Each structure stands twice: as structure tokens, then as C-alpha cells.
Image (spheres, helix red, strand yellow):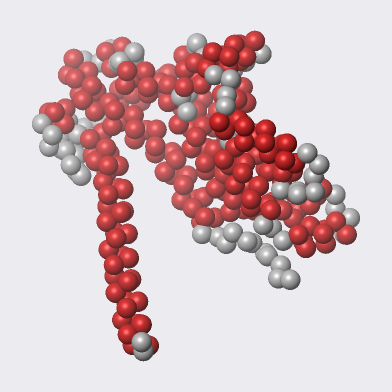
Amino acid sequence: MNTHDMTRGYRVFQWFNALILTVVVIVTLYPFVNILARSFSSQSAISAGEVNLLPKGFNLTTYKIVAADPMFWTNYRNTVVYTVVATFIAIVLTTSYAYVLSKKHLKGRTFLIGIAVFTMFFSGGLIPNYVLISSLGMKNTIWAIVLPNAISVFNLLVMKAFFENLPRDLEEAAAIDGLNTYGILWKIVLPLSKAVLATMILFYAVSFWNSWFPAFLYMNEADLFPVTVYLRNLIAGATGADSFGAAAAEVTQAAANIQAVTIVLTVLPILLVYPFVQRYFVSGVMLGAVKG
């Protein structure tokens, strides 16, 4: 096979690859665009099934109803606080645990890994967890959401594998220069781990942002709910447009596209944050590797 045939074959592959990826993008984006269009459409257009990619009978009724409720903004603020605090604690604990497990000379390393993996397959169950949280006095506090889910074993194992593949020459050189374990982690390992740290931050942030069941289970006061519980109650009908004093027509409109509006309000912040984290995903897995 000559170079011309190889070049032509590669071009054909590029065309097919571009075509397949375009189809995947369209299939992936279509539901999101449809939901966005429904959130701005009128009740009659939604009921008639006329909404596709563009809004029909553009209106902001449901958005106004939700935004006019002070509890919505209180719960939204709670979600931001819960997500930031929980993600920070999760990253600190996961990074520390993963770095320890990456040291193959550590005594008891297999036991520590086994403890982590065990929790992937077995848990205490819903009722024991509820009793535990209650007995620790964490009900109606942020800690009921943050601490029980502070370490994801999957994320832990991913970070452990990443740390294991970092070049040992750098850590050995740093140790010779007088850095202790904490100094090596802070000044050497973490700067080389921006890609995996950004990925873990995104994973944890999305998980905590979308989480609603722990708050629904452990919190009894509405002003402590995250926005996901607020929106869940809105969809379930526990809180409706009529409770805000809306007119009958507005209640009908809100009932028609409340699900689309709640999805948009929940997903939008993550979509806005993602582009700032995405640039780290394209970074090489081995940053500053040493050839030896």
C-alpha cells in the first residue's frame, strides 16, 4: 500500500469519524435543547406536543413563579454552600487517603484498600444510617449531607492509580532536598495532579449539587433544604404555584412545564462551571514526567 492510498484511507476515516461524532452530539444535545424549549413554551403548545427545538408561545410564567418565592433563593444558597463545603472536604480526604494508599511500602496498605473496597459492596442500610446520623446529632445540619458521602471509593481508586504512576524520581529528589511527606505532597505531587484534581472536583461537585435524598431524609426544616429538594417538592406537588398566590391561568401554565423549568434551573450552574474545568481534562495524565 502506497502513501497515497494510506492518505486517502485516512481521509475516509476522518469523514466517517466526524459523521459519527456529529450524530452522537446531536443525539446528546437534542433532549437538553427540547427541555430548554419546553421551559419557555406556553401551556397550550406543550399540551399539543408542538414544542421541538424552539419555544412555542414564549413565556416566563413558571420562571417568575419560582423566582418570586424567597424560599427558592434560600434553598439555592444552601445548595451552593453545601456543594462548596462538601466538595472541599471530599477532595482533602480523598487526596490524603489516595496518596497514602499509593505507597506500596506502607504497612497495612492491603487492609486499608480492603476497607475502602468493602464499602463499595456493603453498607449499613438506610435505617441504621438514619439512627447513626440522629445519634450523632447531625440531623438538620450540613454535616448530615457532607460527612456520610465525603469519600467516593471510585474516585479514591482513580486518584490512587494516578499517584502510583507519578515518577518516583521527583519525590526522591524532594526528600533529599529536605522536604517531608507533607511538603512533597503539597509542593511536588499536587502541582502535577491538576488534571485529576479538576476531574475529582467536578465529579464531587456534580454529585453533591444533584443530591437530594440525604437532605430529604435528615432535614425537617424547609429553610435548610437544598434547591434539589425544593424542586423535587415542586414537581411532586407538595409545593405548587397556587401556594404562591398565582392566578388560575398561571397555575395551569406552571403545571405544564414545571418539570422542564426545574431541570434547567438545576443543570444550568453545572453547565456554566464545566467549561472552566474542561481545559484540565485535555492535559496529559503524566505532567512533568521524568524520563529515566
Q: Position of residue 124 (x, y in %)?
A: 58, 20
Image vertical order of residue 209 relative to residue 16, above or below: above
Task: Give the residue at x 32% y 59%.
Answer: 21
Query: In the rendered image, which quarter contains the C terminus?
Result: bottom right
On screen, residue 223 above or below 287: above
Total marks placed:
0
**185 left or right of 208?**
right
Q: Is residue 122 left or right of residue 7?
A: right
Identify the residue shown where x is 50% and y is 34%: 207
Q: Is residue 11 left or right of residue 41?
A: right
Q: Quadrant of the N terminus?
A: bottom left
Residue 244 visible in the shown view? no
Percent across and percent down for residue 214 are: 51, 21
Q: Quadrant of residue 257?
A: top left
Q: Is residue 13 visible?
A: yes
Q: Residue 11 occupies which quadrant of the picture?
A: bottom left
Give percent across and percent down for residue 84.
Answer: 57, 34
Q: Residue, x 74% and y 55% (percent of image)?
A: 188
Residue at position x 82%, y 59% from top?
Answer: 172
Q: Residue furthest left?
A: 48
Q: Nearer the viewer, residue 109 or 219?
A: 109
Q: Nearer the viewer, residue 77 or 262?
A: 262
Asked if residue 282 is positioned above or below residue 148 in the image, the reply reads below
